[in-house]
Image (cartoon, helix red, strand yellow):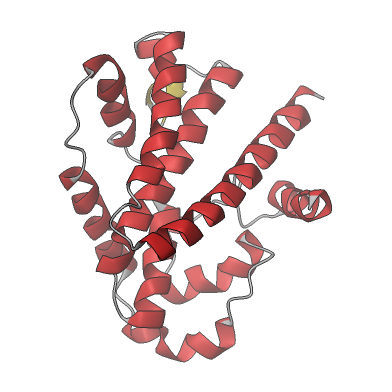
């Protein structure tokens, strides 16, 4: 498994297509076809048959609409308030923007395979929360003052709040999977655990690279 992660991390560092782990550089201007063609470069272990599905991409919901649908669903589900000292920073961090590339890719795949983006929405939020959890902790490790042009949580609040808020975001990512059946929830949880290990590995490897 470590060899697999090493290959992926080497590609992340050396590819011109991405900036940072698994993020297309010019995602905002990608068409649906260009985005899907980038998947083998962004996710080198992917087995998605790009040539097979390319013919049906034209009918896929435009990326902008997918992103807006996910953001609206996200806003609808940010209905937690107490304790404010933890949920306040989480809402702040989630709502300061971002490419939303991971949830959009997930919803696009669902649109292609089963012609249903709504079924993918809980998983899309789950992935977005998991990703942002890693960003909160990365900001702490890197002592970053800004994220997406805004103050990081540990700068706007304090270090303890940032650590606990990040931990809670990780917990909430699993909670967002609850609308699915028990059988599917179990499968998604296992996949989420594996994804978490990969995210933490690539993040740690990037930090080591920066310190050399």
Q: Residue at x 25, y 65 (%)?
A: 65
Which quadrant of the figure has residue 151?
top left
x, y percent for residue 11 = 74, 54
Q: Closer to the camera, 22 or 85? A: 85
Q: Is residue 147 above or below residue 25?
A: above
Q: How many marks?
A: 0
Q: Where residue 8 sits in the image (x, y, percent)?
A: 73, 54
Residue 25 visible in the snapshot: no
Report whether residue 92 is seen.
yes
Residue placed most toward the observer, 10 or 197: 197
Quadrant assignment, res 205: top right
Of residues 190 and 97, the one drawn nearer to the viewer in this rendering: 190
Residue at horizontal 47%, vertical 18%?
Answer: 163
**Residue 72 vs residue 161: left or right?**
left
Looking at the image, is 24 positioned above or below residue 155? Answer: below
Is residue 171 toward the left or the right of residue 115 in the image?
Answer: right
Residue 109: where, in percent of width, then height? 43, 72
Q: Above or below — where is 144 with respect to 8? A: above
- Give the quarter of the figure containing the C terminus: top right
Residue at the front extreme? 182
Instruction: Name the residue rendered at 57%, 67% in the picture.
Output: 39
Residue 211 position within the rendered picture, expressed as x and y whole percent measured from the top left: 76, 23
Q: Residue at x 41, y 35 (%)?
A: 171
């Amino acid at each position: 498994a470590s060899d697999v992660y090493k290959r992926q991390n080497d590609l992340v560092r050396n590819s011109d297509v991405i900036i940072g782990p698994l993020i297309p550089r010019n995602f905002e201007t990608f068409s649906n076809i260009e985005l899907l063609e980038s998947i083998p470069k962004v996710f080198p272990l992917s087995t998605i048959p790009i040539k097979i599905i390319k013919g049906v991409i034209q009918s896929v919901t435009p990326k902008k609409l997918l992103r807006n649908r996910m953001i609206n669903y996200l806003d609808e589900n940010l209905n937690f308030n107490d304790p404010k000292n933890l949920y306040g920073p989480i809402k702040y961090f989630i709502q300061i923007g971002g490419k939303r590339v991971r949830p959009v890719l997930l919803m696009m795949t669902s649109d292609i395979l089963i012609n249903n983006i709504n079924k993918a929405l809980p998983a899309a939020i789950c992935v977005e929360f998991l990703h942002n959890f890693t960003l909160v902790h990365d900001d702490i490790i890197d002592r970053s003052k800004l994220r997406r042009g805004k103050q990081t949580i540990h700068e706007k609040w304090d270090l303890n709040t940032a650590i606990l808020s990040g931990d809670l975001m990780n917990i909430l990512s699993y909670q967002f999977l609850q609308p699915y059946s028990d059988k599917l929830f179990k499968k998604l949880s296992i996949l989420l655990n594996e994804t978490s290990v990969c995210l933490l590995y690539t993040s740690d490897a990037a930090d080591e690279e920066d310190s050399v």
